[in-house]
Image (cartoon, rainbow, N blue to C red):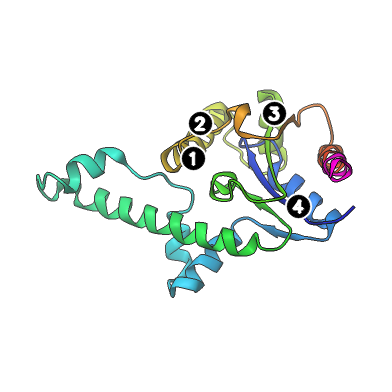
Amino acid sequence: MKNDFVITLARQYGCGGRTVGKIVAEKLGIGYYDTDLIKLAAEKNGVNPEFYKEFDEKATSKFASMFGYSTGIGSFYSSTYTDMVINDKVYFAQSEVIKEVAEKPCVIVGRCADYVLEGKENLVKIFLHADMDARRDRIVNKYGIKDVKNIDKYIMKADKHRAQYYNSYTNKEWGDIRNYDITINTSKLSLEKVADIILKYLEQLEDKK
């Protein structure tokens, strides 16, 4: 199979999305980009990566833009507005890097990459999700989260942040199946098998050309 695809991978928290992305990239022999996009964006703009990292995948506050700056009603909102501006700068800086790395076949996890690259030739948009039981198990046993009592709240909060980020910077809704070429429930399969399904899908796309 020709490795000329750019694969964007959005995922619910705890469904194993990063691992699947790494397996796919490794089997195809192509690049894999996730949190390293922050480092690349920071280096491109001469900023400390740790500073950008704090604002990674965080949404702009529309409330802050309405009241914290435009109406000038005081310093109460000043820090919120500052964060909003930085969020935007990080998003656009990452978007430029995403476009650059996507000049070659690769797998890109999160960060609205499917939207940033919309219309690009050979773009394949994937969304991974999983049942709550499977997500709980992975988070406790694989991610090392020990606060089992509040695990559901932790999962819902993580998904909420991802949805807010995506919805804030796109005209689409995070997790809406209409935004993706293929969605897969990772609950009942090994992540290796999930990666194989993606590879098989890519083969079918290649055969259709």
Three-letter amino acid code at the position of disc 2: Glu
- Is the Cβ of the residue at disc 2 closer than 8 Å to that at disc 4? no
The residue under label 4 is 5
Choose mark 3 or mark 4, whichever is in front: 4
Please report whichever mark, 3 or 4, sits nearer to the chain's N-terminal start.
4
Number of other residues with Cα within 10 Å of mark 1, as a class: few under 14, some 14 to 19, many 20 or more: many
Magenta part mainly helix, strand or loop?
Answer: helix
Between circles 2 and 4, the one closer to the viewer is 4
Answer with mark 2 or mark 3, whichever residue precedes in sequence. Answer: 3
- The residue at which mark 2 appears reads as 173
Q: Which residue is mark 3?
A: 130
**Picture residue at 48% right of the left edge, 48% below the top:** 57
Look at the image and give the residue range highlighted in magenta. 202-209
Q: Amino acid at mark 1?
A: Tyr
- The secondary structure type at the circle numbered 1 is helix
Name the spot of residue 54 as percent of width and height, x first: 44, 56
